[in-house]
Amino acid sequence: MNVERLKYIIWAADTARAVKFYTSVFGGKVIRENPAVTDIEVCNGIIGIHGGGEGKRTWTGLSFQVADVITGAAEIVAAGGQLLREPQPENGEAPHLAMCVDTEGNEIMLSRKRN
């Protein structure tokens, strides 16, 4: 099988709000739009934001690796998202995980590369 592209779909009750969140927080670039789905490229990965979501809390499995999860978590909150779990130091190291929620109820994770 020749896979042409891999895309992860999330749901949004408000597609424009979700697009603004992923483009402003993660530097995503809109690469395709139609009335049903907007595709956003983030670090060579594609997130398809599908309209018609109900805004219910849903774990997505999406994880975004960033240099500093504390700063990243603050940016998510500033953009209208939420924190489910504050970043915590582990084993004497700086925090490496932050559990977050986007503006549409999709749970996402921030992680830091571990030494």
Image: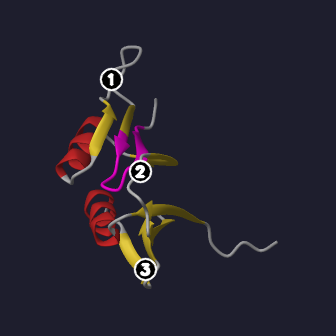
- The answer to whether any part of residue 26 appears in the image is yes
Identify which amino acid the numbered label 1 is placed on: Gln
* Near-viewer residue (70 or 108): 108
- The boundaries of the magenta stretch are 100-112
Q: Tell me where residue 47 appears, x and y as whole percent.
A: 48, 65
Q: Tell me where residue 76 appears, x and y as whole percent.
A: 26, 48
Asked if residue 40 is positioned above or below residue 10 in the image, the reply reads: below
- The answer to whether any part of residue 43 appears in the image is no
Q: Are marks 1 and 2 in contact (CB under 8 Å)?
A: no
Q: Name the residue under label 3.
A: 31
Residue 106 is left or right of residue 19, and the answer is right
Asked if residue 10 is positioned above or below residue 76 in the image, the reply reads: below
Secondary structure category for the residue under label 1? loop
The answer to whether residue 97 is magenta is no
Instruction: Report crowding for label 2: few under 14, some 14 to 19, many 20 or more residues within 10 A (C-alpha).
Output: few
Q: Which residue lies furthest to the front in this view?
A: 54
Q: Which quadrant is home to the N terminus?
A: bottom right
The answer to whether residue 111 is magenta is yes
Q: Mark 2 points at which residue?
A: 56
* Residue at figure coordinates x 35%, y 56% from the top left: 104
* Residue at figure coordinates x 26%, y 35% from the top left: 70
Measure the alpha-carbon separation of dots 3 and 2.
26 Å
* Near-viewer residue (86 or 84): 84
**Nearest to viewer (mark 3 / mark 2):** 2
Q: Which mark is residue 88?
A: 1
* Near-viewer residue (16 or 45): 16
Residue 88 is left or right of residue 47, and the answer is left
Q: Residue furthest right?
A: 1
